[in-house]
Every structure is written in structure tokens, then in C-alpha cells.
Amino acid sequence: MSANRSFGVVAREDLLASDGLTFLTRIMEGDLPSPPIFETMGFAFTQLEKGRCVVRGEPGVRFYNPSSQVHGGFALAILDTALGCAIHTMLVAGEGYTTLEIKTNMVRGMTAETGLVHAEGKVLHRGRTTATSEGKLTDANGKLIAHATTTCMIFPPQ
């Protein structure tokens, strides 16, 4: 992954022109810009394969809530990314998707001292119109921070 990666929005035609795994791999390799949310949250893909996605991030003080801990939204956002992108890797050219629901369980809190975390999403089911995936968020020692499941709607090619 390039330290000089760019951030931006890819044209919809380019998004739909290739299968999901190819598209996301091009982002991970720096051939396409990472989405703006990756810049905002400090996320990056670390592993991609059909039905699986790993995203890393580093919780820090900028994500603190009034309780002086990392806001739960950080865990939800990184898990939503990993779970949704795991489903994205299963799309054929022309298909799209969106999240219908996500359920997250927070197991322990995070602080700036937590260090790098990894969210791994794995597809459980890919149907014609819906897909489900599950995932977990762990710290560098593999300690569970949160886990989640999602259901996404699949849009057929136009």
C-alpha cells in the first residue's frame, strides 16, 4: 500500500465496469483513489479475497467521546466497511449494493493506547437480491473489541 495514496470518488461507470474484487483490489493497490471516508477515519484495506475483506484503522484521541474513550461509531464504521466490502468482493460487473441493516456488539472499549485495529468481514450468504456477512474487530494482539453482522441488498446490472 502506497504512503502517497490518493482519496476521491470514482465515477459510477468505473465502479460498475469491473467485478467487485477487481475494483476494491485496484483501490488497495493505489490504481484508484481510496474513498473519502478512508481519509476521514484513517482506514485502509489490508487483505481482499472473494468473500473476505480486512480493514485496518487506528483509534485515537480525535475519535474520543465525552467519556474520554473512542466513540463506538469508530467500531461500527470500520466493521460496516469490512462487512460491506466483503460482500462487494462477490459482485459481478454492473451490480451494486447497499446496507439494509447492521448489528454490532461492543465487547470492550478503545482508547488512543489501543493501537492499530483490524476489522475482518466474511460473507455468510450471497443470494440474488441479498447478502449477509459477519465480522470481528480485534486489536494487534487478537483481542476481540466488537463483532457484527450485516444484511445488504444487491442491485442487478442495469
Image: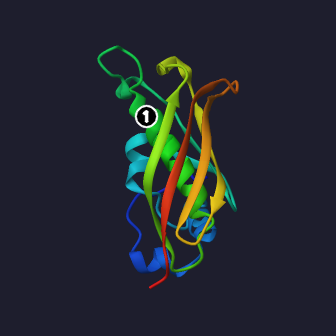
Residue denoted by label 1: 74
Residue at (39% x, 23% y) in the render: 61
Residue 4 visible in image: no
- Packing grade of label 1 (10 A; few <14, some 14-19, many >=20) is some
Residue 8 place in picture, x, y as percent? 38, 61
Residue at the image point whose x is 60% and y is 76% from the top? 92
At horizontal 61% and vertical 45% (from top left) the residue drawn is 134
On the image, the x and y values in percent for residue 40 come to 37, 44
Look at the image and name its color scheme. Answer: rainbow
Q: Is residue 10 above or below residue 108?
A: below
Give the vertical position of 85 relative to 113 (above or below). below
The one nearer the camera, 128 or 52, is 128
Residue at image point 46% right, 45% down: 102
Q: Residue furthest bottom?
A: 158
Q: Measured from the top left, where is residue 127 in percent x and y? A: 61, 67
Q: Quadrant of residue 6?
A: bottom left
Task: Indicate the amino acid at tag 1.
Answer: Phe
